[in-house]
Image (cartoon, rainbow, N blue to C red):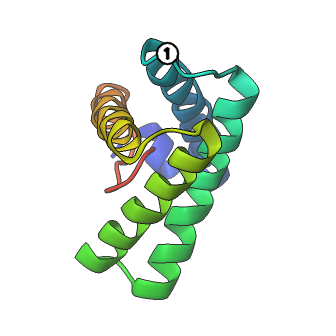
Amino acid sequence: MSLLEESAPAIIFVIGLVISTVIIFIITKLFGGRTNIGKAFITAIIGALVWVITYYLFGHGLLATVAGGIAWLLALKGIYRLSWTRAAIIAVIIWIVSYFVAVALRLPTAPGPL
């Protein structure tokens, strides 16, 4: 068990939020999105809220993951004014990068973004 897993959940949340913000900023910037760190932070916060709400409503499982993914995709599409295809591509890349960063940093991982 890593030191972070034994620490307060708030610390893990803040670290995950910072990492998610940076990943979202970089990926959306690479795809030519009109972004800044503040917009990426808002996107990360909304993503975290989406996952909390869907896991609360649907429990832990495939339904919660799918519902959370669709809700976050809607948020990403709306915040960055992207097409469905572009939002889906960016979302998948963000999830993949987030997963590998979490594994590399030995952070607890979840089906959604950090």
Picture quadrant where residue 107 is located: top left
Q: Where residue 44 appears, x then y in whole percent?
A: 60, 43
Q: Which residue is drawn at 70% across and 22% down?
A: 37
The number of discs equals 1
Q: Where residue 2 appears, x then y in whole percent?
A: 38, 40
Q: Residue at x 63, y 21 (%)?
A: 34
Q: Is residue 83 left or right of residue 78?
A: left
Closer-to-camera residue (90/44):
90
Is residue 11 in view from this perspective? Answer: no
Closer-to-camera residue (96/70):
70
Task: Please name the residue that numbered disc 1 is placed on.
Answer: 32
Q: Is residue 69 above or below residue 19?
A: below
Picture quadrant where residue 105 is located: top left
Closer-to-camera residue (71/60):
71
Is residue 63 in view from this perspective? Answer: yes
The residue most toward the front is 83
Q: Residue at x 52, y 34 (%)?
A: 20
Q: Quadrant of the C terminus?
A: top left
**Disc 1 crowd, CA 10 A, few/some/many (<14, 14-19, 20+):** few
Q: Where residue 16 appears, x then y in whole percent?
A: 54, 39
Q: What element carries label 1?
A: loop
Q: In this view, does 112 lie above or below 26?
A: below
Q: Where residue 56 appears, x then y in whole percent?
A: 51, 81
Closer-to-camera residue (30/42):
30
Q: Is residue 97 above or below residue 79?
A: above
Q: Which residue is drawn at 46% across and 39% down?
A: 3
Kind of residue at badge 1: Gly
The residue most toward the right is 38
